[in-house]
Image (spheres, rainbow, N blue to C red):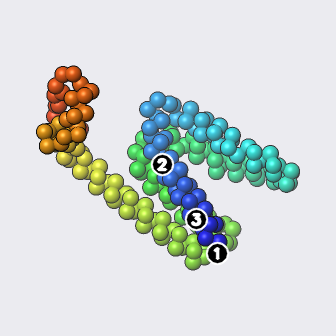
């Protein structure tokens, strides 16, 4: 039983990592790819991963359910795979991540309103925990972004410490690797206030 719990928690963490990194990775992919290329690539990769499950279970699907599954696939997968990259050309990845985190909330609302499902205690606890986690992450991210934009990140002191005579190992390493003395410049990430 304990082994199954470890596997379940590991899979949950993996899912959270994949799902949570998606807006960030989409934003990074937009540097080189068109939003439609990203959507097509995501759909293609998902198809390759899911095709073995379809091949194994296709005969269990009733013919009358094909249309419902097709519409569900278009609305639930194809459209979001293209709409997320298109949206991220106008909004940042943090906003996209926060909006994505609301998906379980809206899924529960749709289930309760349209399918007369009952919201269980575990559903509510899960939503609250997810919302609190998203809020903490958002507050931390906004604070960090504000700090970096206001003050920048100054690496010069760390580089000076590495090159100072107080630190023996780096000096020995630099002496072995570089035949000439190494000079360091003042390294600062640019901010909006710098000219």
Image point (40%, 50%), residue name:
94
As measured in the structure, the alpha-carbon distance from the residue carrying label 1 to the one carrying label 2 is 31 Å
User: In the image, residue 177 lies at what x, y percent?
Assistant: 27, 27
Marks 1/3 in contact by CB < 8 Å: the verdict is: no
- The residue lying toward the viewer, choosing from 157 and 109, is 157
* Residue 107 appearing in the image: no
Which tag is nearer the camera, tag 3 or tag 2? Answer: 3
Identify the image quadrant of residue 189.
top left
- Residue carrying label 1: 118
Front residue of 193/10: it is 10
Q: Secondary structure at mark 2?
A: helix
How many other residues sit within 10 Å of disc 1, few (<14), some (14-19) or many (≥20)? Answer: few
Q: CA distance from mark 1 to mark 3?
A: 29 Å
Q: Which quadrant is the C terminus positioned in?
A: top left
Identity of the residue furthest to the bottom in this view: 121
Query: What residue sits 23% from the left and 37% below the top?
Result: 170
User: Mark 3 or mark 1, which is nearer the start of the sequence?
Assistant: 3
Image quadrant where one finds the N terminus: bottom right
* 151 up-or-down from 130: above or below: above
Residue 70 lies left or right of residue 102; in this view the side is: right
**The quadrant where residue 62 appears:** bottom right
Q: Residue at x 47, y 69 (%)?
A: 129
**Which residue is labeled 2 in the image?**
21
Q: Which residue is mark 3?
A: 6
The relative height of residue 177 versus residue 166 in the rendered view (above or below) is above
Going from N to C along the chain, the mark reached first, 3 or 2, is 3
In this rendering, would 180 be left or right of 60? left
For the residues marked 3 and 2, what is the alpha-carbon distance in whole angstroms? 22 Å
């Amino acid at each position: 039983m304990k082994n199954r719990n470890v596997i379940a928690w590991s899979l949950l963490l993996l899912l959270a990592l994949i799902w949570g990194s998606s807006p960030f990775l989409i934003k990074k992919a937009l540097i080189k790819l068109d939003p439609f290329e990203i959507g097509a690539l995501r759909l293609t990769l998902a198809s390759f991963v899911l095709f073995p499950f379809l091949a194994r279970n296709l005969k269990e699907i009733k013919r009358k359910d094909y249309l419902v599954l097709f519409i569900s696939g278009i609305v639930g997968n194809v459209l979001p795979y293209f709409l997320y990259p298109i949206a991220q050309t106008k909004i940042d990845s943090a906003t996209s991540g926060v909006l994505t985190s609301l998906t379980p909330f809206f899924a529960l609302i749709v289930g309760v309103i349209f399918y007369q499902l009952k919201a269980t205690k575990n559903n509510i606890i899960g939503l609250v925990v997810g919302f609190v986690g998203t809020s903490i992450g958002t507050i931390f991210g906004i604070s960090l972004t504000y700090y970096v934009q206001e003050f920048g990140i100054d690496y010069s002191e760390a580089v000076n410490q590495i090159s100072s005579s107080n630190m023996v190992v780096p000096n020995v390493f630099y002496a072995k690797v570089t035949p000439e003395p190494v000079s360091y410049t003042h390294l600062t990430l640019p901010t909006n206030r710098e000219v």
